[in-house]
Image: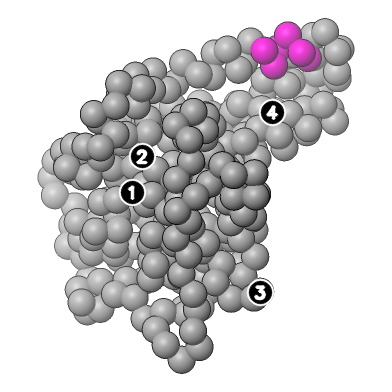
């Protein structure tokens, strides 16, 4: 298995070589607007706070909601809370929840093998973001890997209209910026809390696909290239303990050693304390056992 993971890759199939200009254009526009947000005329402490709050909301929605709760069913929460967490994660604009979950489950099935859509064997840039700029054959298997979500009308609706969530968010931010008269006004808040936030969250999420399959250490001898990378774990609220996760995908806790701080896991514990999380599955690290 390890040889198949680390072996040389052939050229992309012809059907995958064509660039998806819709996705590429969307990413390019967001990166340009994120750069504009950093101009002095749009900086304010209000913009920083809006960015920070929505970064927490979005990243937690991805890690706690889309990933550990829905993709792996590592714990159970009330339906209303699951939907709130999924909406939070969908604010990351990383496709709708059905596609996100389906692709993630497919990744675990074929991690770092040629069928993996962000196969680290094709290099750091491919696994980081290039893969999404081309056709993704795994999308043809979404119903197989996320049929449970496809059966839910709420998830079907959100999968179709996820991009529209940014509109009321942007209008609300613009109104707050104008009313409070922060430096940069409503436009400054919008630029910091939408394109700048999206771009930072994109790259943090992509680092889990790229850096944690190239940098760091391994607690477990998994049949893939997954690594534990502390700085990715800091940025991604614990997702950087990626080797632990690939060894125990169903575990709600990714940081398994005493020094592997897992911010998302602390939120799971908080939910449990308030009686909102149950049936929590947790793996354990035993030295010398992999």
Counting residues from the start of the chain, the first of labels 4 and 1 encountered is: 1
Mark in the foreground, 1 or 3: 3
156 displayed left or right of 32? left
| Mark 1 surroundings within 10 Å by alpha-carbon count, few (fewer than 14), some (14 through 19), many (20 or more) | many
Q: Is residue 67 visible?
A: no
Is the N terminus in the top left, top right, bottom left or bottom right quadrant?
bottom left
Helix, strand or loop status at disc 3: loop
Q: Where is residue 143 in the image (x, y as percent from the top left)?
A: 18, 37
Mark 2, Cα crowd under 10 Å, few <14 / some 14-19 / many 20+, is many
Q: Mark 1 points at which residue?
A: 104
* Image: 33 above or below 56: above
Q: Nearer the viewer, mark 2 or mark 4?
A: 2
- What residue do we see at 37% from left, 30% from top? 96
User: Image quadrant of residue 167?
Assistant: top right
Q: Does the magenta stretch include residue 78?
A: no
- Decide if residue 232 is on the left or right side of residue 162: right
Residue drawn 39% across and 84% down? 290
Numbered label attached to residue 100: 2
Q: Magenta segment, which residues?
A: 172-177
Q: Distance from label 2 to label 3 (Cα)?
A: 30 Å
Determine which residue is flagged by label 4: 192
Front tag of 3 and 4: 3
Secondary structure found at label 2: helix
Which residue is drawn at the image coordinates 34% and 19% (left, top)? 157
Where 167 falls versus 60 (above or below)? Answer: above
**Residue 150: image x %, image y %?**
25, 30
* In front of the other: 20 or 55: 55
Answer with mark 2 or mark 4, whichever residue precedes in sequence: 2
- Say whether marks 1 and 2 touch (CB < 8 Å): yes
Dot 3 or dot 4: first in sequence order is: 4
Q: Name the residue under label 3.
A: 259
């Amino acid at each position: 298995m390890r040889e198949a993971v680390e072996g040389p890759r052939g050229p992309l199939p012809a059907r995958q070589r064509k660039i998806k200009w819709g996705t590429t254009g969307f990413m390019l526009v967001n990166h340009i607007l994120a750069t504009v947000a950093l101009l002095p005329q749009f900086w304010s402490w209000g913009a920083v706070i809006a960015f920070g709050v929505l970064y927490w909301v979005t990243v937690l929605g991805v890690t706690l909601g889309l990933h550990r709760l829905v993709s792996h069913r590592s714990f159970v929460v009330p339906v209303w809370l699951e939907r709130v967490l999924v909406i939070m994660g969908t604010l990351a604009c990383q496709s709708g929840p059905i596609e996100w979950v389906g692709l993630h489950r497919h990744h675990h099935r074929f991690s770092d093998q040629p069928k993996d859509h962000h196969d680290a064997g094709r290099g750091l840039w491919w696994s980081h973001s290039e893969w999404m700029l081309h056709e993704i054959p795994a999308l043809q298997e979404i119903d197989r890997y996320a049929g449970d979500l496809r059966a839910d009308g709420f998830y079907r609706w959100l999968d179709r209209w996820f991009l529209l969530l940014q509109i009321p968010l942007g209008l609300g931010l613009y109104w707050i910026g104008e009313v409070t008269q922060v430096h940069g006004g409503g436009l400054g808040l919008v630029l910091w809390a939408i394109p700048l936030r999206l771009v930072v969250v994109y790259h943090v999420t992509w680092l889990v696909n790229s850096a944690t399959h190239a940098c760091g250490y391994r607690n477990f001898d998994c049949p893939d290239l997954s690594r534990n990378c502390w700085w990715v774990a800091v940025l991604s609220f614990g997702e950087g303990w990626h080797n632990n996760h690939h060894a125990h995908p169903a575990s709600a806790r990714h940081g398994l050693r005493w020094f592997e701080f897992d911010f998302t896991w602390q939120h799971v514990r908080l939910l449990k304390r308030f009686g909102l999380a149950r049936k929590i599955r947790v793996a354990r690290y035993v030295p010398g056992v992999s």
